[in-house]
Image (tube, rainbow, N blue to C red):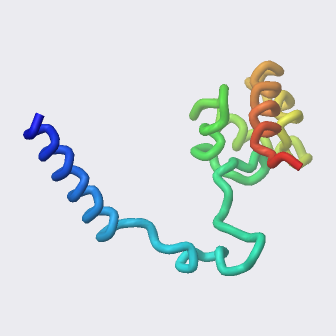
Amino acid sequence: MRDSRHGFLLALIVAIAAWRAFGLHPPQGLEGWTEPGTGPPTLIPDLATDDSLRLSWLPGVGQYRAEQIVAERPLLQLPLTPPRLALIPGVGEHTARQVTRWYDRQQPDP
């Protein structure tokens, strides 16, 4: 019992030291946090502009399908939105609905 407590305390001390040495910067050190109502860039992928890596984060969209989206979206001649995702060859209506629901859940509540 005593050894496990010492191990836990040692791990806690190491974690606190690492946090202090390599930890997060305070908010005033981050770009965009000094102005009210702004912040760092969002982690929500933008279907119209983001690369295939960020699009692969979407539910039902893997790396291969994300590369298809990036290759085909200039041919749409419309901004790509979640409901229009089914217009991309290889992306079905089921995936488009799944991504649309995911985007809807990401919107802040009014």
Where is residue 87? Give x, y as percent.
86, 30
Q: Nearer the viewer, residue 68 or 95?
A: 95
The quarter of the picture where the N terminus appears is top left
The residue sitting at 66% across, 75% down in the picture is 32
Could you say which quadrant of the image residue 33 lies in?
bottom right
- Does 43 appear above or below 33? above
Where is residue 107? Give x, y as percent.
81, 46
Q: How many marks?
A: 0
- Does 12 appear above or below 91? below
The residue sitting at 70% across, 43% down in the picture is 70
Q: Nearer the viewer, residue 28 or 7?
A: 7
- Does 66 appear above or below 107? above
Could you say which quadrant of the image residue 3 lies in?
top left
Where is residue 89? Give x, y as percent.
78, 27
Left or right: 20 as drawn, with respect to 24 = left
Left or right: 72 as drawn, with respect to 83 = left
Left or right: 19 as drawn, with respect to 83 = left
Residue furthest front as drawn: 2
The residue sitting at 32% across, 69% down in the picture is 20
Could you say which quadrant of the image residue 91 lies in?
top right
The residue sitting at 82% across, 38% down in the picture is 104
